[in-house]
């Protein structure tokens, strides 16, 4: 029973993570690529693009020599940090 619950939690966290990353990716795309002539994408399109990239890439970008807690923080906060930089650039510098 415990293994089943762990599996369900891992799947749920994975789905939530891709929704989170899709939100960040679509905002960054629409802020920086749409003004250059690319079409706007939705959150769903962004999640799909990221799933394709994840499948093609097939590895974790976080270095394996770090401790687990550092990996979890990097995994969770690096997209948010990217989004915050993009938000700052769009709203304060006028890109």
Image: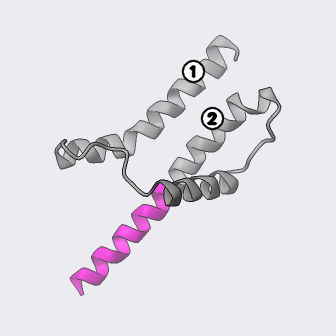
* Disc 1 target residue: 88
Q: Residue at x 56, y 59 (%)?
A: 51
Q: Per the image, is 78 magenta?
A: no
Q: Tell me if 67 is positioned left or right of 35 in this view.
A: left
Which residue is painted at 83% across and 31% down in the image? 37
Q: Position of residue 72 (x, y in %)?
A: 28, 48
- From the image, which quarter does the N terminus lie in? bottom left
Task: Pick out the residue farthest to the top.
Answer: 93
**Looking at the rendering, which quadrant does residue 36 occupy?**
top right
Question: How far from the left and from the top, in percent, is residue 86?
Answer: 58, 26
Judge depth for marks 1 and 2 and give the one in front.
2
Q: Quadrant of residue 58?
A: bottom left
Q: Is residue 80 left or right of residue 44?
A: left
- Residue closest to the eye, 66 or 72: 66
Question: Which residue range is magenta in the image?
Answer: 1-17
Residue occupied by mark 2: 28
Mark 1 / mark 2, whichever is N-terminal: 2
Crowding around mark 2 (Cα neighbors within 10 Å: few <14, some 14 to 19, many 20+) is some
């Amino acid at each position: 029973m415990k293994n089943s619950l762990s599996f369900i939690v891992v799947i749920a966290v994975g789905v939530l993570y891709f929704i989170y990353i899709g939100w960040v990716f679509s905002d960054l795309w629409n802020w920086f690529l749409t003004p250059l002539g690319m079409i706007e994408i939705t959150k769903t399109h962004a999640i799909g693009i990221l799933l394709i990239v994840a499948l093609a890439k097939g590895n974790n970008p976080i270095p394996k020599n770090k401790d687990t807690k550092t990996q979890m923080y990097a995994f969770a906060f690096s997209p948010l940090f990217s989004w915050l930089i993009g938000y700052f650039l769009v709203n304060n510098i006028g890109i």
